[in-house]
Image (spheres, rainbow, N blue to C red):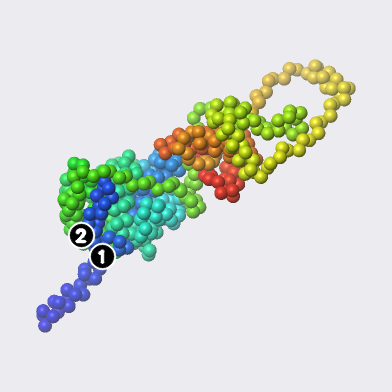
């Protein structure tokens, strides 16, 4: 009877019924080859492994100019009220993005993760949708995010396979930030925070990346370690305790180092195409670009209707010389394409020239002018100023070289003269290419230009003031 009761007790123990499903994967970090897996495609609760994607999107936003690490983020009531683990943010507080990133990476702070998402996409829901889109672009086909922190939510699921893929992308896509995941402690602005990742000290060669725990998920961990020329990434979902999880990860890393070949080519994963807040998030919708120096080139003015000059269209060779850029034949193609895009094919109808003033009136005006005091020379403004409210701009694409960016700027300016007249054309060289930007616009004119360009299926993103 006692034995039977003991058996029943073991069978219905809460510890057994609440145990999270176990899944694991081991990958050769150099090639992406899977060396071991069990239940790796089972959709489970990722817990704070979620913050790996939160940070991946944050790094993407910084790289593409949506936000900077120095941007001061205002903490919302929603972010401040998140459950622990927390940095301790307060509603209305302002804190630099870099400190939120550090707190999310090292302490796994939920309030910091939510604040990051809201700063980039305007709301946590919009940011979660962006996280999911980014996951799909990375090849994480069985992952759906519902929040930025990883606390249990219906439908918020991932797999050991997908999280291993994400860990590898963080390593190769953003190596400049990867060191965050190996820090034992860091300054998070309002306090110094410490890491929960004990495997960094207990396993030789371990240098990241992220732990996670909730009751529904169990103890999760994605770990990466390097020994010699070998790089191994191991993931565990559903550990029963942090100690047993760390021991299992160490076992999996050992297995990976044994199975991985001594020499293997490094095949870096392809970085996904940048889409930003493409579903209409209310955060910063485009790139933030600081203008440096004066603009040296501009569009040539179009002849006024009624001008006796026979030229009523843009002279490609003349534009090419004035811009000092693309060749005349390329400009001619851009002009032709702009004309076709705008729907025009003929020169504008010439209006009659105004009649000359009567001689008596002209003489009277000259006589009056001679009796007046000299007038101070006036400053003639020939271009829109970027002061006041004209700090806005638009981006019309990123290109592999300056030549293509300049060509696109010219083509776009010619086809959309109504909204882009007087703007400043600027090519900005970034690490990922050459951005084609129009600057010196008001917010309203920039939004109007983007709406008109997008209506013709052309790329356009707002550039907010810095």
Looking at the image, residue 127 sits to the left or right of residue 46; the answer is right
149 relative to 322, above or below? below
Q: How far apart are marks 1 and 2 (CA)?
A: 13 Å
Of 288 and 350, the residue lying toward us:
350
Identify the mark at residue 280; answer none if there is no mark.
none
Give the side of residue 285 with respect to residue 139, left or right: right
Q: Which of marks 2 and 1 precedes in the sequence?
A: 1
Q: Where is residue 46 in the image (x, y as percent from the top left)?
A: 31, 58
> In this orientation, which residue lies closer to the viewer: 91 or 455?
455
Q: Name the residue: 42% across, 39% down.
A: 432
The residue at the point 62 percent across, 38 percent down is: 336
Dividing the picture into quarters, in which one does residue 424 lie? top right
The N terminus sits in image quarter: bottom left
Any part of residue 11 in sight: yes
For mark 2, does the 10 Å Cα neighbourhood hold few (<14), some (14 to 19), or many (20 or more) residues? few
| Residue 79 drawn at (x, y percent) | 40, 53
Q: Is residue 82 visible?
A: no
Residue at position x 66%, y 45% in the image:
343
Residue 132, percent across and down? 40, 56
**Extreme-front residue of the structure:** 329
Q: Mark 2 points at which residue?
A: 241
* Count of numbered labels shown in the rendering: 2
Compare residues 181 and 326 and report the one nearer the observer: 326
Q: Nearer the viewer, residue 286 or 401?
A: 401
Task: Identify residue for label 1.
Answer: 21
Badge 1 marks a residue whose secondary structure is loop
**Residue that appears at 22% across and 60% down:** 239
Looking at the image, residue 194 sits to the left or right of residue 444; the answer is left
Nearest to viewer (mark 1 / mark 2): 1
């Amino acid at each position: 009877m006692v034995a039977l009761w003991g058996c029943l007790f073991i069978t219905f123990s809460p510890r057994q019924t609440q145990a999270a499903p176990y899944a694991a994967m081991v990958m050769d970090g150099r090639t992406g080859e899977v060396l071991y897996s069990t239940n790796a495609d089972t959709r489970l609760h990722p817990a704070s492994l979620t913050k790996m994607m939160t940070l991946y999107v944050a790094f993407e936003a910084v790289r593409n100019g949506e936000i900077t690490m120095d941007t001061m983020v205002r903490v919302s009531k929603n972010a401040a009220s998140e459950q622990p683990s927390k940095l301790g943010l307060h509603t209305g507080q302002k804190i630099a993005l870099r400190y939120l990133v550090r707190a999310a990476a090292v302490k796994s702070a939920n309030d910091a993760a939510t604040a990051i998402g809201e700063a980039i996409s305007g709301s946590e829901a919009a940011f979660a949708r962006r996280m999911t889109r980014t996951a799909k672009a990375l090849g994480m086909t069985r992952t759906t995010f519902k929040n930025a922190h990883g606390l249990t939510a219906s439908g918020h699921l991932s797999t050991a396979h997908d999280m291993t893929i994400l860990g590898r992308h963080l390593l190769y896509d953003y190596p400049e930030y990867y060191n965050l995941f190996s820090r034992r402690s860091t300054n998070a602005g309002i306090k110094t925070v410490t890491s929960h990742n004990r495997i960094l000290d207990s396993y030789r060669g371990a240098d990241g990346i992220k732990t996670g725990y909730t009751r529904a998920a169990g103890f999760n961990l994605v770990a990466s370690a390097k020994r010699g020329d070998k790089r191994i990434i191991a993931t565990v979902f559903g550990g029963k305790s942090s100690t047993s999880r760390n021991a299992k990860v160490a076992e999996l890393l050992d297995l990976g180092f044994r199975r991985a070949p001594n020499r293997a080519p490094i095949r870096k994963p392809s970085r996904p195409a940048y889409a930003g807040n493409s579903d209409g998030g209310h955060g910063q919708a485009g790139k933030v670009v600081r203008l440096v120096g004066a603009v040296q080139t501009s569009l040539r003015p179009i002849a006024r209707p009624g001008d006796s000059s026979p030229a009523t269209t843009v002279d490609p060779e003349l534009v090419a010389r004035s811009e000092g850029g693309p060749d005349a034949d390329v400009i001619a193609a851009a002009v032709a394409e702009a004309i076709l895009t705008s729907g025009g094919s003929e020169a504008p109808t010439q209006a009659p020239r105004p009649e000359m003033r009567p001689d008596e009136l002209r003489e009277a005006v000259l006589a009056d002018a001679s009796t007046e005091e000299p007038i101070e020379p006036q400053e003639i403004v020939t271009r829109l100023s970027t002061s006041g409210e004209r700090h806005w701009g638009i981006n019309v694409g990123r290109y592999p070289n300056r030549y293509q960016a300049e060509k696109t700027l010219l083509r776009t300016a010619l086809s959309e003269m109504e909204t882009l007249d007087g703007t400043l054309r600027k090519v900005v060289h970034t690490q990922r290419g050459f951005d084609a930007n129009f600057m010196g616009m008001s917010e309203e004119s920039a939004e109007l230009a983007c709406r008109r360009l997008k209506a013709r299926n052309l790329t356009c993103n707002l550039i907010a003031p810095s």
